[in-house]
Amino acid sequence: ARAHRGRLSSPGLRRAMGKGYRDGDAPWRFSGRALYQLNLVKSSEARKHVPADLKLVELFGYTLGGVYLARYEDSPAGTFDEMVALGGLVWNPPTSCAWAARVFVNDERARAHGVKTCGLPSALARFDDDDEKSDAETRRDGWWKNVKPLSVFAKARAFVLDGKNKKRFMSRSETVRLRDGDTGAEVCALALPGAGAGPLGPRINLKLPSFSGRTSACPDLLKYSLDMRANVRLSGPILAETETEATTSAAQANAVPPRKQNGFWAPTGDVRFPPAAALASAASLSLAQSPAVTDAGAEKEVPEKSASGTPRPPADAELAAILRGKPLLCIAFDAMEMDVGAPTAVAAR
């Protein structure tokens, strides 16, 4: 069984596979699979995460954000999972790249390296799938477990052999829920596309320099190289739900019985994605309760910290605005090898 299918990967296996993040070993290599989705994000939301002295690449009030989801089979920290919420696209001549607004990993060494060395807002989280909620007879295929869908021949054979029990050859999409690594509180849920049904796509090489930093641990603006080799293919979108939406959905479900849905992205009987009005209502409620919009004389709240001393992953309207941006393109990287260079300080221009 794969170690990172569980909630937190095994420390013993991580020590066996990962050699650690040693400065002399850079560039650090990561191998596995990833999904990279570009979303249209409002510039006003992106500005909440991007340093004020950096230019935002925008058009008609929108910039390019998105979601990066990876399952690393090997890395300096061994086997672990990562989700990055990309706030927007920044420009610092001669390079433009996405700016990470939130980073979630299920490995403490990876979190510490991201915070202390790379200047990333990394937080510890658990990645739980919904297998325990599904019945044993229904297939759960998709990208997370890399279970390929049944072929037309296999579906026909299953129908002939057991046509009365359609669940034997039906499948449901996967949903992965990110939870706070300390408390288990849900941060967001991601409904994932299916795994690639055919052979691997063409193999390409990509060079993607990245910016980070401007944190308390790394106050300088940092730049690091990222060289990737992977087989690429177009994928279905990643659809997201944040904790505020889940709360609104639960309240609506108590008031009105949920209407059954038959579709790939929302399993039957599960109201997984509320309408846009519910998101707007949840965002307004979250903002109304935020210290930033309280009375001027009110005392500002101090963000709660976890046992590791880092801010807890927030399930707030800012995260919802990024994850619920309009999907433009989702690319799957299979058989991925990624070399990440050591960050260096650069000047903002």
Image (spheres, grey):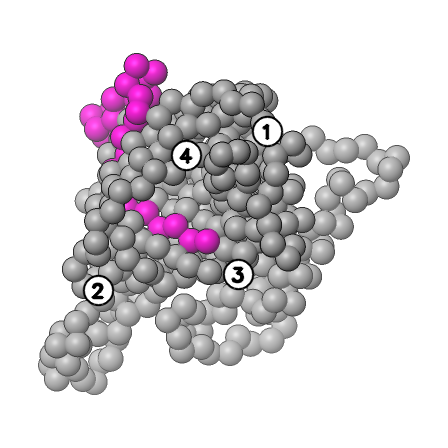
Query: Between disc 4 and disc 1, whose residue precedes?
Result: 4
Give percent across and percent down for residue 267.
Answer: 40, 70
Left or right: 270 with respect to 289? left
Q: Residue 209: which numbered mark, if any?
A: 4
Q: Residue 326: which numbered mark, if any?
A: 3
Residue occupying image coordinates x 16% and y 60%: 199
Query: Secondary structure under badge 2?
Result: loop
Residue occupying image coordinates x 35% and y 55%: 331
C-beta proximity under 8 Å, tags 4 and 1: no
Residue at image mark 1: 349
Query: Secondary structure under badge 3?
Result: strand
C-alpha span from label 3 to label 4? 25 Å
Q: Is residue 36 magenta?
A: yes
Residue 142 can be seen in this image: no
Closer to the camera, 322 or 181? 322
Which mark lies nearer to you, 3 or 4?
4
Q: Residue 197: which numbered mark, if any?
A: 2
Residue type, label 3: Lys
Residue numbers of the magenta segment: 11-38
C-alpha span from label 2 to label 1? 45 Å
C-alpha span from label 1 to label 3? 30 Å
Query: Between disc 3 and disc 2, whose residue precedes?
Result: 2
Left or right: 295 with respect to 43? right
Which mark lies nearer to you, 4 or 1?
1
